[in-house]
Amino acid sequence: MNRGSLQRRWRQARHSLRARLTGLFLLLALAMTLTLIAGMQAVMRDGWQELARPLTGDYIDRLTAEIGTPPDIAKAQALTRRLPLRIRIDGPVVHWSSRPNDPHDARALERGADGDRPPSLWRPTRVLADGHRISFGLASLPRDDAPEDRARLIGWATLLVLLALVALAYARVRRLLRPLADIRAGAIRYGAGDFSRPIAPRAHDELGELALQINGMADGLHHLLDAKRQLLLAISHELRSPLTRARLNAELVDESPSRDALLHDLAEMRDLITDLLESERLAAGHAALHTEAVDLNALLRELVAAHFAARGITLALDAQLPALELDAARMRLLLRNLIDNALRHSPDAATAPTVTTRIDAAAVLLTLRDHGPGVDDAQLPLLAQAFHRPDSARRRATGGVGLGLYLCRLVAQAHGGSLTIRNAQPGLEIELRLPLPGASARA
């Protein structure tokens, strides 16, 4: 996994509510465990030990007196048989240990009898008047059952139990928040104009009510958009007849600059109505297409020869391009709009627009590059919006009604592809990406 992928996943985790809740639960579990362990240790160290120390000291004095001076090994052996103790005696005469063959006990007694260290609670030492030193300790348990190990085991077990509880709580919270993923997916569908599938509420809680409210809002927007679309289609259809009559009447007028201007305006109105109707049909996506196997290179050559033969368009076409399932009429409209747009906005360029095709991964790429002035970077995301007109570089005087690139984007999306516009320094470069048969388009 490369560094970029790790950084991307880290950013996603930082913005993920699920990941933040998981981190919160883990921190809570660790804090509770550390607090519990520290509190118990403090109680044992500062409470019970201080209370038990004088009692233990008095008991050790009694045991020392029972062994006697000089130390009586028989009495010491009797004590170790009766009590869970280990005893070691060192001195000028007697050298004896209750567990001489147990290395663990020997090391523990040596640490307890070390004069450089203060005697601990469980390994006290007493020095007799004759110079003998008696060291006491609790009887050694198996290593796995030693008090320190048991305490450590209890601490880890407590941590594991807390982590298990956190995992259960996280699973429950994840299940409670699962409707958020459905709501997000539904909002994305609604934003893309797909109102065919509402959000299914998973539970009768606040998130379920939110899903129902969003469904209601989306249903209202859907009806509003349908009403707008129907009104737009009706007006467009109704305008066609009087527009046709007006154009016929204008044709009968004597030739003059005014007649030419009138015919030009009527042609723009006709194109506007045609584009509006086509855009509304394409809003239905793939359902509006009539696809067949199309040779994109042949379609380009035919279009350039028929409409742009004298404009010097340069074609750099990949001969290995496979046939694609396309709506030939809509694709011809897309290509014509793209080439016309490039020519219109680079009239004084020394180099004519260039069209290239190639295969890239699971898609076919068609790129059109002009050598005009281009546009500001801030305008790029707006170029394919309906009725958008950039600033002085692409003025009203250059013609068009602001629907050309919008229609191109709709045609590309209806085919499962995408349209990308970027500055080429100089000029503008438009990339059409179409999926290969059996492959999904990648934006």
Image (cartoon, rainbow, N blue to C red):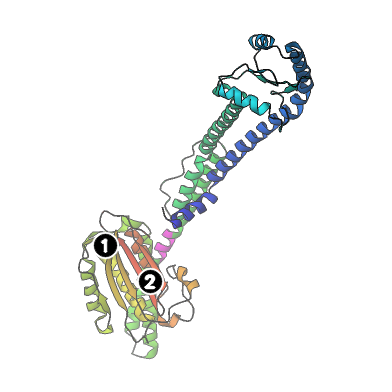
For residue 404, the mark is 2
Mark 1: amino acid: Asp
For residue 327, the mark is 1
Residues packed near mark 1 inside 10 Å, few (<14), some (14 to 19) or many (20 plus): many
**Which segment did they paint magenta?**
229-235
Residue 71 lies, in percent from the top left, at 72, 14
Q: Nearer the viewer, residue 49 or 81?
A: 81
Mark 2: amino acid: Gly
Q: Cα distance, mark 2 to mark 1?
A: 17 Å
* Above or below for 17 versus 162: below
Q: Nearer the viewer, residue 2 or 151?
A: 151
Residue 292 lies, in percent from the top left, at 22, 59
Residue 17 lies, in percent from the top left, at 55, 46
Q: Nearer the viewer, residue 95 or 331?
A: 95
Q: Does the magenta stretch mainly form a helix, a strand or a loop? A: helix
Q: Nearer the viewer, residue 54 or 74?
A: 74
Q: Secondary structure at mark 1?
A: loop
Q: Quadrant of residue 336?
A: bottom left
Q: Quadrant of residue 120?
A: top right
Q: Secondary structure at mark 2?
A: helix
Q: Quadrant of residue 140?
A: top right
The C terminus lies in quadrant: bottom left
130 vs 243, left or right, is right
Mark nearer the N terminus (2 vs 1): 1
Residue 406 lies, in percent from the top left, at 40, 67
Q: Is residue 218 visible?
A: yes
Residues packed near mark 2 inside 10 Å, few (<14), some (14 to 19) or many (20 plus): many
Name the residue at 53% across, 43% down: 18
Q: Is residue 237 visible?
A: no
